[in-house]
Image (cartoon, grey):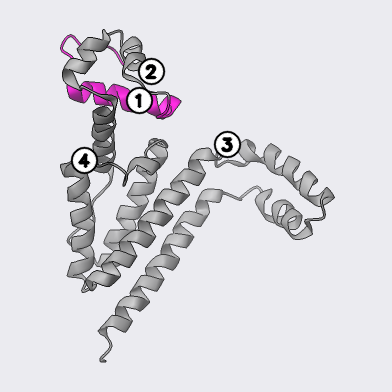
């Protein structure tokens, strides 16, 4: 893991070790006993600092939220939200286990709450009514988390990583008569410059364009 036990173990250090373990092995593999073995500590020492796996995960999710850039108060709403979304995607790529957990914790901490408050505040300062704030936040985060999940399960985002799989699938679907899918795979996916991840910014800008139009409609006299 690259982690070395400290003379004075702290909760923050345990969270860092747990995140490194989850980044490498997945969240399902993480238990307090396994983590204790990896960092060469007694399980009871771990429990002294963090008394359950659920509380450990809560703190890990808090750390993930802390890594995401907040919308800048000095920028226009679109630039601020776009930067925040790009940051969120980068953070979730570093921690591929995190996306399903970001909105599912029953005990959100100050980093999570502060992040949500900052995003909502950015929309409100731009004049978004609450109903449009709700739509904007739900759509953007569904897109970010969903895209991050797909990136996490792909073999990689390089031609070398997925070309062999794509070629195998192309042969199968061509035999099955799925001609359009086969053409898409051979004529687009197998191109040397194809990257699944390039669709993120394209999709993000489509959403932001739609939100801009929706905001303009809200401002029109009724």
Q: Where does label 2 land, which residue?
A: 1
Q: Mark 1 or mark 2, which is nearer the start of the sequence?
A: 2
Q: Where does label 1 land, which residue?
A: 20
Residue at image position (41%, 66%) is: 207
Cα separation between marks 1 and 3:
20 Å
Residue 161 lies, in percent from the top left, at 61, 36
Location of the C terminus by quadrant is bottom left
| Left or right: 91 as drawn, with respect to 194 | left
Which mark lies nearer to you, 2 or 4?
Answer: 4
Q: Where does label 3 land, which residue?
A: 155
Where residue 66 sits, quadrant-wise, is top left
| In the image, residue 133 above or below residue 31 | below
The reply to whether the C-beta atoms of the residues labelled 2 and 1 are less than 8 Å apart is: yes
Q: Which element is circle 3 on? A: loop
Cα separation between marks 4 and 1:
22 Å
Q: Considering depth in this image, is 195 or 63 the residue closer to the camera?
A: 63
As for residue 22 lying within the magenta part, the answer is: yes
| Left or right: 103 as drawn, with respect to 178 | left
Q: Which element is circle 2 on? A: loop
Cα separation between marks 2 and 4:
28 Å
Cα separation between marks 4 and 3:
33 Å
Q: Mark 3 or mark 1, which is nearer the start of the sequence?
A: 1
Residue 123 lies, in percent from the top left, at 23, 66
The reply to whether the C-beta atoms of the residues labelled 2 and 4 are less than 8 Å apart is: no
Q: Residue 139 carries which label?
A: none
Q: Mark 1 or mark 4, which is nearer the start of the sequence?
A: 1
Q: Where does label 4 land, which residue?
A: 107
Residue at image position (25%, 42%) is: 106
| Left or right: 29 as drawn, with respect to 190 | left
Q: Mark 3 or mark 4, which is nearer the start of the sequence?
A: 4
Q: Give the range drawn in magenta.
A: 1-28
């Amino acid at each position: 893991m690259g982690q070395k036990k400290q003379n004075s173990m702290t909760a923050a250090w345990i969270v860092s070790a747990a995140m490194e373990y989850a980044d490498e092995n997945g969240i399902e593999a993480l238990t307090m006993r396994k983590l204790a073995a990896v960092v060469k500590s007694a399980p009871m020492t771990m429990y002294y600092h963090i008394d359950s796996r659920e509380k450990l995960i809560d703190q890990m999710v808090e750390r993930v939220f802390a890594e995401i850039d907040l919308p800048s108060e000095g920028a226009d709403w679109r630039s601020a939200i776009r930067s925040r979304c790009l940051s969120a995607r980068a953070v979730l790529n570093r921690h591929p286990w995190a996306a399903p957990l970001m909105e599912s914790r029953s005990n959100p901490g100050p980093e999570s709450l502060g992040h949500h408050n900052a995003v909502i505040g950015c929309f409100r300062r731009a004049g978004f009514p609450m109903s449009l704030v709700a739509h904007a936040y739900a759509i953007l985060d569904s897109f970010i988390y969903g895209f991050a999940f797909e990136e996490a399960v792909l073999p990689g985002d390089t031609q070398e990583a997925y070309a062999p799989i794509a070629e195998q699938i192309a042969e199968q679907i061509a035999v099955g008569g799925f001609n359009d899918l086969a053409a898409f795979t051979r004529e687009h996916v197998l191109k040397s410059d194809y990257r699944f991840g390039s669709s993120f910014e394209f999709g993000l800008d489509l959403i932001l364009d739609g939100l801009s139009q929706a905001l303009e409609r809200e401002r029109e006299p009724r």
